[in-house]
Image: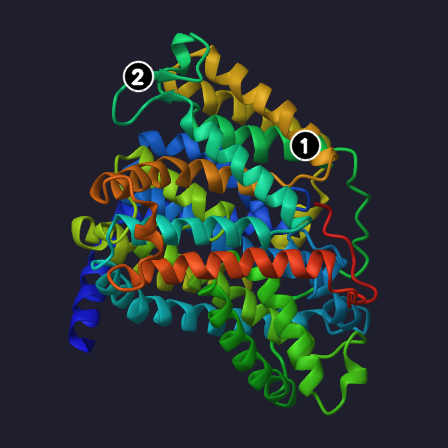
């Protein structure tokens, strides 16, 4: 087992260190870091805008670039949270509680230094976790039949929708909308047209690029374009020498970073529990076990180290079920699977054996990318801070321009641009009504696979739905289905019968999303 992992990693580095792949990895982490630093631009928006580019990029390079944007943005997001009290991305909201007080005390550089070290440690642990756990999951999933895979997808969809921000019922509704959108076009088994209203351009259904750019490009920009307050750069004068913590400060943040890493890695194994929830759980846990909890919220090193380590270990761990089982835990992972589908690569257990260059090359690129981010962030902190002064009246039109160009380039057709605009307008209406768009993408990406596996299970069982609750021959499918029922039941219980006051973090700033 150990020798197999190391030999596979050696192969992965031989793929990741090829010049073209190294270049795409560097582009990804650079864009990710830039997106993390700039308030108002999100990871989903950035990946959505660049998704059309993957049509013209080799499949390995495309995945490495998009993944680099995801984990690279987490490094950049900490800069805004600590120096500006501006959580550009939800996982960093809790970092503001102690990061900005440290900045006002003249220790902003120290907070950033601790964050970088804790983040690298958390990411490294997440990578090691993926190296050893993903092959085990793949080996176990080889025994899965159609019923088991269908039940697992159902659990992933429910977890991703009910554990997302906002109302669980609205999350489920948006997931169902995504599932319906995936059925538009030709039937995968019979080839018969359905739900396309006779529109020839809709024969193959909705484009994943149009849905991603519409929901996370146009809709997100329209939502935030008039909500960006002027940035107070009074505390942003941080030098490279300010980043190095003292021995006492390093000792103070070391164990919290370890505990946060463990919490983040555990959260990453649960579908739907992303880095945001992991960071909040880590912060609450660290505050509870601290001998001086009154320091939290007033500039505690532990309050920065713990949630940031949890965020990065969770981000890296999120790739485990996505790449090994083909089950995305959130919208970002769904976009990464979309990049594979664009290149006719079927996500799931067969990915490891049929496309080892993608799987092991991605893991190897994690090491390379995180080292790149450490090198880019520490000496270039001044440059990243100066980027915060870019006026948003320039950023938004440029982003919308690239959205139109990217959509048109997919099939060189204006129909795609019109489709993207329509989805974007519907998306902004849904957002104003309190519906989150992420579950739509999750349902759309998994929709066709869910339909195919369900129909295959029905064919094998001759139409007997009891195959999903057969504890003798299909106990894994029955277990996943039982967990789905428990998840739904718990949501109903907490929504209607559990009358307790919700605990919130006082003074938590808005994420702006």
Give residue 471's quadrant in the image.
Answer: bottom left
Does 507 appear above or below 193?
A: below
Of badges 1 and 2, nearer the viewer stands 2
Q: Quadrant of the C terminus?
A: top right
The residue that appears at 42% across and 7% down in the rendered structure is 198
Q: Quadrant of the N terminus?
A: bottom left
Image coordinates of residue 59 in percent, x first then y, are 28, 40
Estimate the spatial distance between the alpha carbons at disc 1 and disc 2, rounded to whole Å. 31 Å
Name which quarter of the figure residue 379 lies in. Answer: bottom right
* Dot placed on the residue nearer the N-terminal end, 1 or 2: 2
Give whichever of 487, 64 is nearer the camera.
487
Residue 392 visible here: no
Can the viewer see residue 311? yes
Residue with the mark numbered 2: 192
What secondary structure is found at the residue carrying circle 1? helix
Q: Quadrant of residue 142?
A: bottom left
Say above or below: 192 vs 108.
above
- Of residues 140 and 504, the one drawn nearer to the viewer in this rendering: 140
| Drawn side of residue 475 relative to residue 2, left or right | right
> For mark 1, what is the residue?
430
Horizontal side of 490 relative to 72 (left or right) equals right
Question: Callout 1: 10 Å neighbours few (<14), some, many (20+)?
Answer: some
Q: Residue at x 51, y 65 (%)?
A: 312
């Amino acid at each position: 087992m150990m020798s197999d992992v190391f030999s596979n990693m050696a192969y992965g580095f031989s793929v990741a260190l090829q010049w073209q792949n190294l270049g795409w990895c560097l582009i990804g982490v650079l864009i990710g870091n830039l997106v993390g630093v700039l308030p108002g631009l999100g990871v989903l928006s950035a990946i959505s805008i660049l998704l059309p580019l993957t049509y013209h990029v080799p499949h390995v390079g495309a995945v490495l670039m998009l993944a680099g944007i995801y984990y690279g943005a987490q490094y950049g997001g900490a800069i805004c949270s600590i120096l500006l009290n501006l959580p550009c991305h939800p996982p960093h909201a809790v970092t503001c509680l102690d990061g900005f007080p440290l900045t006002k005390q003249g220790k902003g550089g120290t907070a950033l230094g601790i964050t970088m070290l804790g983040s690298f440690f958390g990411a490294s642990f997440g990578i090691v976790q993926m190296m050893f756990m993903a092959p085990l999951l793949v080996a176990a999933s080889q025994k899965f039949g159609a019923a088991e895979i269908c039940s697992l997808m159902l659990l992933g969809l429910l977890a991703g929708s009910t554990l997302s921000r906002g109302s669980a019922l609205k999350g489920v509704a948006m997931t169902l909308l995504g599932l319906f959108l995936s059925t538009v076009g030709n039937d995968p088994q019979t080839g018969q047209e359905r739900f396309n209203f006779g529109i020839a351009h809709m024969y193959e259904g909705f484009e994943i690029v149009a849905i991603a750019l519409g929901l996370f490009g146009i809709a997100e920009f329209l939502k935030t374009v008039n909500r960006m307050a002027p940035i107070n750069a009074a505390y942003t004068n941080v030098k490279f020498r300010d980043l190095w913590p003292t021995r006492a400060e390093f000792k103070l943040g070391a164990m919290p970073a370890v505990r946060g890493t463990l919490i983040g890695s555990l959260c990453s194994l649960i579908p739907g529990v992303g880095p945001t929830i992991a960071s909040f759980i880590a912060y609450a846990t660290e505050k509870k076990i601290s001998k001086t909890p009154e320091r939290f919220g007033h500039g505690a090193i532990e309050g920065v180290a713990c949630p940031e380590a949890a965020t990065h270990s969770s981000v890296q761990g999120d790739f485990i079920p996505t790449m090994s089982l083909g089950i995305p835990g959130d919208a970002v992972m769904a976009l990464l699977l979309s990049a594979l589908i664009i290149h006719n690569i079927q996500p799931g257990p067969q990915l490891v054996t049929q496309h080892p260059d993608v799987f092991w090359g991605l893991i190897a690129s994690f090491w390379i990318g995180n080292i790149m981010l450490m090198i880019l962030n520490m000496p270039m902190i001044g440059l990243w801070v100066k980027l915060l002064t870019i006026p948003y009246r320039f950023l938004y039109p440029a982003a919308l321009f690239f959205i139109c160009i990217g959509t048109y380039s997919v099939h060189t057709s204006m129909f795609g641009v019109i489709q993207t605009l329509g989805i974007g307008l519907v998306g902004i209406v849904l957002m104003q009504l309190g519906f989150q768009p992420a579950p739509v993408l999750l349902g759309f990406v998994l929709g066709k696979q869910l339909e195919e596996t369900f129909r295959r299970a029905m064919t094998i069982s001759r139409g007997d739905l009891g195959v999903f609750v057969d504890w003798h021959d299909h106990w894994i499918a029955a277990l996943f289905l039982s967990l789905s029922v428990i998840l739904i039941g718990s949501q109903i219980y907490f929504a209607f019968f559990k009358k307790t006051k919700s605990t919130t973090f006082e003074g938590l700033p808005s994420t702006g999303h």
